[in-house]
Image (cartoon, grey):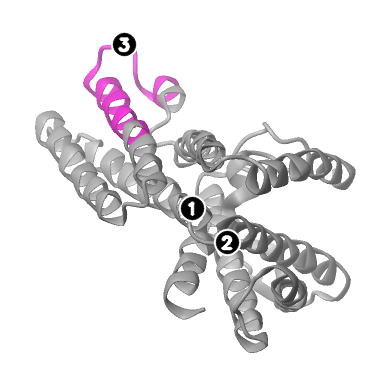
Amino acid sequence: MLLKRWLTAAVLIPVLLLILLKGAPIAFTLLVLIISILSVSEYFKITSYLSVKSLIKSSLKSPFSDDYISVVAVKAVAYILTVSIIAAAHSSSLEMMLILITLNVIAVSLLTVLQFKSGSPILDYISCEIQGVIYIPLFLSFLVLIRNSPNGAHFVVWLWIIVGLSDTGAYFVGSKFGKRPLAKHVSPKKTIEGSLGGLCAAGLVGLIYALIFIDGVSFFMAIIFSVVTAAFSQLGDLFESALKRSTGIKDSGSILPGHGGVLDRIDGIIFAAPVAYLFKVFIL
């Protein structure tokens, strides 16, 4: 499994670096869009509320039932919003991104009114969709905002290195020295020692990268940024683990050999991206 993880990374990392450092901004936006769509699809599969396959297996007999129509309609709204939010981010329009989130709530509320009846699961569908749209395309759209800002490409690489080192450092330190569980009901194998090891690795390597490639960032702030974003990336990892554990799913998908699904691979960066944007615009 570990060999597959390294081989997959060896293939994907050069492609990502090429798109980020040499490609046009639209190329990175399209990459984030594809990742967002795949992740939303996996999210729906994990939560099961909006999984058509799950509905068919449980109680549906006809694709023309109210529940089936509700699921298709809610998912359609989610995918439309995914594309729209990423497009708004490419235009560097935070205002439009917020408007789209508002419109999403209004649209699914309208579906609730139209489809609601006694015993209907429509409110479960709606809450699942609203969380998914905020959790995935909105959070990932901050990567596009960062990429399209001054020195944005190197900043995104910096963020990816921090998240990657946090994950790798936590794995190796936790495997060797881990004893105390970090969140035993969410992910029993993750330990406090591993988490601290990941934060230290991210802080050290993040600092080195900042000193070489990121202009205008002090020694102190480079460490703070690296550790804080690494901490949020670990939170993102745990949040996705909680989602999967709630429905008994081991991996969000199988598209990436050794890594599982797309959501399994980017769960950390989802939470780290808006924090990184906050640092870049208001703190650093």
Would you name the residue on which mark 1 appears?
148
Q: Which residues are magenta?
A: 55-79
- For badge 2, the amino acid type reads Asn
Main SS of the magenta part reads: helix
Residue at the bottom extreme?
220
Would you name the residue on which mark 3 appears?
62
Closer to the eye: label 3 or 1: 1
Q: Residues within 10 Å of mark 2 (few under 14, many from 20)?
A: few
Residue 241 visible in the picture: no
Q: What residue do we see at 69% from left, 43% from top?
A: 16
| N-terminal-most mark, 2 or 3 | 3
Q: In the rendering, at what x and y percent does residue 259 appear?
A: 73, 43
Q: CA distance from mark 2 to mark 3?
A: 53 Å
Q: What residue do we see at 21% from left, 50% from top?
A: 99
Closer to the eye: label 2 or 3: 2
Judge left or right: residue 40 versus residue 181: left
